[in-house]
Amino acid sequence: MASFIGGIHPVYNKITRKNKIEVTPLPKKVILPLQQHIGAPCESLVKEGDLVKVGQKIAESKGFVSAPIHASVSGKVLGIAKSPHPVLGECNSIIIESTGKIEWDESVKKRDNIENLTKDELKQIIKEAGIVGLGGAAFPTHVKLSPPQEKKIDTVILNGAECEPYLTCDHRLMLEQPEKIIKGFEIIIKILEPKQCYIGIEDNKENAIALFEEKLQDLNLQDKIKVVRLKTVYPQGAEKNLIYSIIKRKVPNAGGLPMDVGVVVQNVGTAKAIYDAIYDGKPLIERIVTVTGAVKEPKNLLVRLGTPVKDLIEFCQGYEGSTGKIISGGPMMGIAQYTDEIPIIKGSSGVLVQREEVIKEQERDCIRCGRCIDVCPMQLMPTMISQYAQKDDFDNANEYFALDCYECGCCSYVCPSKIPLVHYIKYAKAELMKRKKK
Amino acid sequence: MEKLTISTNPHIKDKDNVNKIMWFVVLALLPAAIAGIYFFKTKALLTIIVSVISAVLTELLIQKLTKKEITIKDGSAVLTGLLLALVLSPLVPWWTTMLGAIFAIAIGKMAFGGLGHNIFNPALAGRAFLVASWPALMTTWLLVDGTTGATPLGLLKLEGIKTAYNPLLIGSIGGCIGETSAIALLIGAAFLFYKKIITWEIPATYIGTVFIFALIFRQDPIFHILAGGLLIGAFFMATDYVTSPLTRNGKLIFGFGCGFLTIILRLFSGYPEGVMFSILLMNAATPLIDRYTKLKPFGYRKPAKEVKE
């Protein structure tokens, strides 16, 4: 079965896999950070007191690698203020008070004659809709769809691996809206004109694999788009690993991109967002979020961007027991938060609540078991990087390719000495990046 | 809202830890220890008890004196003590055993900075110390009938007599307490493989190399695998995490080196046995092997040459 070298088999705990996506009630207030993507931050187009409608563009950037932001509710702009941000800690955000009604902006209109749209028109719509990679990295989608001339794209992969434990948002979306995902994928295919197209799904989502095979048959697309059954192993859904699993190409290290090997990967949620933008004229104002772990009723939710996590927890009937950690994302790569006031942003795939940890295991010296090396999907030597990082020996950390680490967390997960390897590697990476900029 | 914990990802961890690994290895050695006690009776039992207690107490004392965290519960000192006892002749006096265990922990392990920092396998360091200090005591062997005599490798080297396979498999031969019964050792090794505590690289290349070179030198390869300390060495000593290389290629080189040195020492040195010194020599070579077997990352490409300005 299709897979890569390394990886781990954590307990998956996909407790919400059978929960239908529920629509979250309209929030009273949304917090929309001016930066929700990789690239240049946006500048606000509105000011305090302005009235906005759902889908109205409220922030934009002049940079190419950027994505505009749209109002997710209709209401009054309360102001632009520094607010908690799940990735950056804090960020300037537009705060909108909802009127309690859904009033769509005039720009949001269904489109006909999709066939007649040119590639550039399609890309422009995607760009204007503020779509970014919804798998978590939040890289602006139109940039990925505009590879430079010299990079010939011959393969497009739709990522439905969802390898993070606990998270089920992609799984549910695949089960509930397969047609929209496929239509969105066809738009991507139209833009990039690849020779081969794949949808990769881990084999712990058997029903999604079967459904996609069936839908592709119905649409007579089975020769064009192949469903690939992937081995369930974390981090199967990481771009570089996924590409290797499916077509055995290796994305070059030291900053290489999938397009260097002729590949573009898009998440299934992104394909659905592309469908919404092209067919319904809807910009990215909502996404699916798995709220799970120590909450009374774990759920898969359709959430308006900017909704505070606190509201979602409330909708899930509150915390279960005493809360130790709130994680934005999954347990392997998610970010621990200092407050539940953080909003859901474009890249938020999940909210995982953990109880207070009963036992905190003591970190001890490395016993050189080599497990971190065996599981590293980048074939790095985490223990060596970590040891050099602890001594502030960044030259040697670099010799062991610290910068090639994408922080999947496998090394820390398996370490029997409970060394927070990712923590030390991140530290080395931050220092090395600083040096590079000098 | 109460205070939330902030930490770097990942937020879940595997249940395995150092203590579990060490105690599992101790468990894996029990069949060999029981076989030793069965064949060599109270002498073996006494050696095991003295060795384990001396090792644990030495670690406790040193950690108390240096005001370090007490780690005797992690099982690593117990393991060192047990391993040392299993590679001693049942005729070694208790005080010799005690000195060996003290040396193993104090010099072999703690002097380097404790678990994870030692260069040599502590149990083998302890044994080497005893071999160098009391060579006669260390090479007097007990036979199952209660008399003293030579080990199968000694018999082969000095008198040209080859022991049959059956006694070698069961362990009814002269030798160290834990090395004589091949079956007991293989049961323990199977457990370690099952628990994924050891991997095939070192034992397979070690034993495979001995097999091939035995053939080359026109020796009986099966005999060389079953006799002496090869099995306990290949499965329980050479696989020691701390003192063997980190990467797969490193482990393959290490296993080959151990096997090659073992057969050379057995056939061409003054000693009938070569397992201990071969592993210790390869322990010393481990930092060097690690340096030359550094991994290249997935998708490695040679860095572009920097443009001169």
Image (tube, coloured by chain):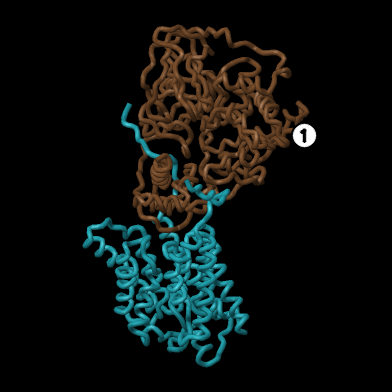
Q: Which chain carries label 1?
A: A
Q: Can residue A317 be seen in this view?
A: no
State whether residue A332 appears in this view: yes
Q: Is residue A200 above or below residue A27?
A: below
Q: In this view, does A418 lie to the left or right of A26?
A: left
> Exactly how many numbered labels are in the figure?
1
Q: Residue furthest front?
A: B309
Indicate the position of residue A61 as horizontal and vertical percent values: 49, 21
Residue at screen point 33% across, 62% down: B114
Q: Name the residue under label 1.
A: A223
Letter of the cyan chain: B
Q: Chain A is drawn in which colour?
A: brown
Query: Whole-percent x and y of residue A217?
Result: 76, 30
Which residue sits at x=32%, y=68%? Answer: B105
Amino acid found under the numbered disc labelled 1? Asp
- Relative to B172, A92 lies left or right: left
Residue B126 or A145: which is nearer the viewer?
Answer: A145
Taking A61 as reference, is A251 above or below it? Answer: below
The residue lying at 44 percent from left, 60 percent from top is B24
Quadrant showing the N terminus of chain B: top left
Assign a secondary structure to mark 1: loop
Judge by depth and name the residue closer to the eye, B115 or B48: B115
Q: Position of residue A5 (x, y in %)?
A: 58, 50
On the image, which quarter does residue A113 sit in? Answer: top right
Tell me where residue A351 appears, x and y as whole percent: 46, 29
Please tell me how crowded label 1 is: few (under 14), some (14-19), or many (20+) other residues with Cα within 10 Å. few
